[in-house]
Image: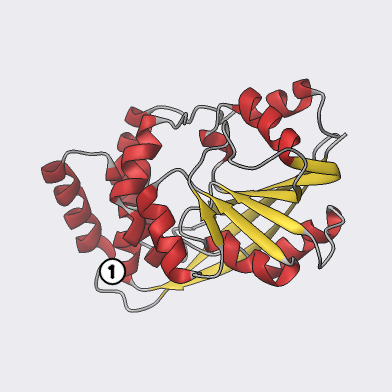
């Protein structure tokens, strides 16, 4: 199973924080993607790199069966605890543990940038039935200092760690890989916004779940999170605005 080592260690160490503090995906946006892909109520959906089930939960009302594939045992255990009726399988985007042409749609939430994109495109196309489709979602923070006065200091503290970790494997190349595969129609896009309501301590957990923080040495990570807590930890209510980016294409 091919998994970027930063993801393998970071998410294994932060599964509980990820589950507690990461934003969900707007149900209306997920339903919009299902309609765009022609997913019927009796269809089968694969949630690829499903994590702790943030997207899986939104997919359950839209198909008769949802299969979750997740490489991290810790993340998969959280998903199974949250959604015990879902088939949760160990596997990766480059080695999906399903037979050929067995699903009607593949959804990927906040993960395609981690994939080895050319291999993932081939595997996704392999498990899709004729006419099936691929949907990608990303929640992007759309926070403003006007709403959150602590944000400039927060960014100044954390951005150097993100830069030091380096880019994601397919951060800028996945659209090209999808197009060059010749396996999908041209990608269509849309976006929506939503608000994630948490408290200051949950924001500390949110930072904990970021791979470039989760992978820091223990003492350094504790010091960074302590400074985050000093900035925001006593706030009882935070309304964090997100922009959810949507991408979809059909199997050719």
Q: Is residue 165 left or right of residue 56?
A: left
Observer-nearest of 164 and 232: 164
Q: At 49% across and 58% down in the image, what residue appears?
A: 144
Q: Residue furthest left?
A: 219
Q: Residue furthest top?
A: 180
Which residue is identified by label 1?
Answer: 201
Q: At 43% across and 55% down in the image, what residue appears?
A: 76
Is residue 66 depicted above or below 94 in this figure?
Answer: below
Quarter holding residue 176: top right
Look at the image and tell me whether residue 212 can be seen: yes
Q: At 46% across and 62% down in the image, what residue appears?
A: 79
Is residue 163 depicted above or below 151 in this figure?
Answer: above
Is residue 84 depicted above or below 129 in this figure?
Answer: below
Residue 44, percent across and down?
Answer: 74, 57
Q: At 54% across and 65% down in the image, what residue appears?
A: 24
Observer-nearest of 242 and 103: 103
């Amino acid at each position: 199973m091919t998994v970027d080592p930063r993801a393998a260690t970071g998410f294994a160490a932060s599964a509980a924080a990820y589950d507690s503090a990461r934003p969900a995906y707007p149900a209306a946006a997920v339903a919009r993607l299902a309609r765009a892909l022609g997913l019927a109520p009796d269809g089968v959906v694969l949630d690829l790199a499903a994590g702790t089930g943030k997207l899986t939960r939104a997919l359950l009302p839209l198909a008769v069966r949802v299969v979750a594939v997740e490489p991290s045992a810790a993340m998969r255990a959280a998903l199974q605890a949250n959604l015990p009726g879902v088939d949760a399988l160990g596997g990766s985007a480059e080695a999906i543990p399903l037979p050929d042409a067995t699903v009607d749609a593949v959804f990927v939430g906040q993960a395609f940038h981690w994939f080895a994109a050319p291999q993932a495109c081939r595997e996704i196309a392999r498990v899709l039935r004729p006419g099936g489709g691929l949907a990608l979602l990303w929640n992007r923070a759309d926070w403003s200092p006007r709403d959150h006065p602590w944000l400039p200091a927060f960014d100044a503290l954390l951005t150097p760690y993100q830069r030091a970790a380096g880019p994601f494997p397919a951060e800028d190349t996945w659209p090209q890989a999808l197009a060059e595969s010749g396996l999908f129609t041209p990608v269509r896009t849309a976006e929506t916004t939503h608000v994630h309501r948490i408290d200051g301590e949950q924001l500390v957990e949110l930072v904990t779940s970021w791979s470039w923080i989760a992978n820091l040495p223990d003492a350094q990570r504790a010091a960074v999170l302590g400074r985050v807590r000093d900035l925001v930890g006593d706030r009882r209510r935070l309304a964090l605005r997100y922009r959810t980016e949507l991408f979809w294409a059909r199997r050719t």
